[in-house]
Amino acid sequence: MRITEIYISIQGETQYAGLPCTLVRTTGCDLRCGYCDSAFAFHGGTDMSLDQITAEVARLGAPLVLLTGGEPMRDFTARIHAGASDFLAARGMRRIDHELPFWSIEDPGRRILLVAHAGTNSVFMCHLLGLQPTPWEWDRFVFGHASVSRLEALPVRDGFTFSLTALSSLEHIARDDRTR
Ligand code: SF4
């Protein structure tokens, strides 16, 4: 793994703010965000093995470790699509080779529960609906915490298509307990 720097600092974010923290910053990013404060990590760096990295983290001895740098969401959508295909195929669901999003489903009565963060859920739902995934950067601020979305399979010709029957529902959470 190509590493720009490993150093100890004070965590400034999350519930761990104020604690000593070792930051492991990877090298490389193919985005150019206008607010980026780490352009120095776009190039260069040093190749380090996992053993070398963990040894340096252990030497610094902080109770927290933060992996940072690079573009963590690169290929995110492609990876979720690939994972969704495998996940669904293992449960007898495959996309039919057709321009419209038709599916073959071995057991249409089966219910599948997926627990994931909003970005993953967004891409997963689009995978079933045959839509371009809405950028997760947007959806993660829109979906309610611990919300429930639901898709139901509807028979169409020789297969099934999906209908989105609930999106980010919070009805299972008391109003005072909702975060939005
Ligand atoms: S994704 Fe992060 S590292 Fe890459 S350009 Fe944007 S802010 Fe900088």
Image: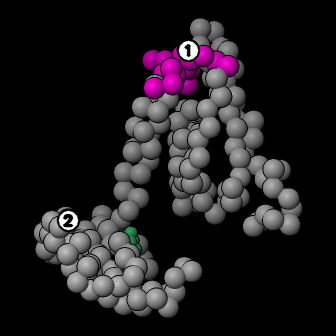
Question: What whole-number distance in Å separates the C-alpha atoms at marks 2 and 1?
Answer: 43 Å
The residue at 50%/91% (across/down) is: 18
* Residue 28, percent from left and from top: 25, 68
Q: Is residue 99 magenta?
A: yes
Specify the quadrant of the image occupied by residue 47: bottom left
Task: Count all numbered tags in the image, as a single digit.
Answer: 2
Q: Is residue 112 magenta?
A: no
Q: Nearer the viewer, mark 2 or mark 1?
A: 2
* Mark 2 nearby-residue class (10 Å; few <14, some 14–19, many ≥20): few
- Quick check: 88 left or right of 7? right
Above or below, 123 against 65 in this view is above
Disc 1 within 8 angstroms of ligand 1 (CB): no
* Residue 162, percent from left and from top: 65, 27
Counting residues from the start of the chain, the first of labels 2 and 1 encountered is 2
Above or below, 141 against 65 in this view is above
Q: Can residue 35 be spotted in the picture?
A: yes
The residue at 59%/8% (across/down) is: 158
> Could you say which disc has been placed on residue 106 in the image?
1
The magenta-colored residue range is: 90-109
Disc 2 secondary structure class: helix
The residue at 53%/45% (across/down) is: 123
Above or below, 70 against 127 in this view is below
> Could you say which disc has been placed on residue 50 in the image?
2
Give the amino acid type for the residue marked by disc 2 in the picture: Leu
- Quick check: 52 left or right of 124? left
Q: Can residue 42 be spotted in the picture?
A: no
Characterize the magenta stretch by its predominant secondary structure: loop
Q: Nearer the viewer, residue 134 or 180?
A: 180
Above or below, 179 against 158 in this view is below
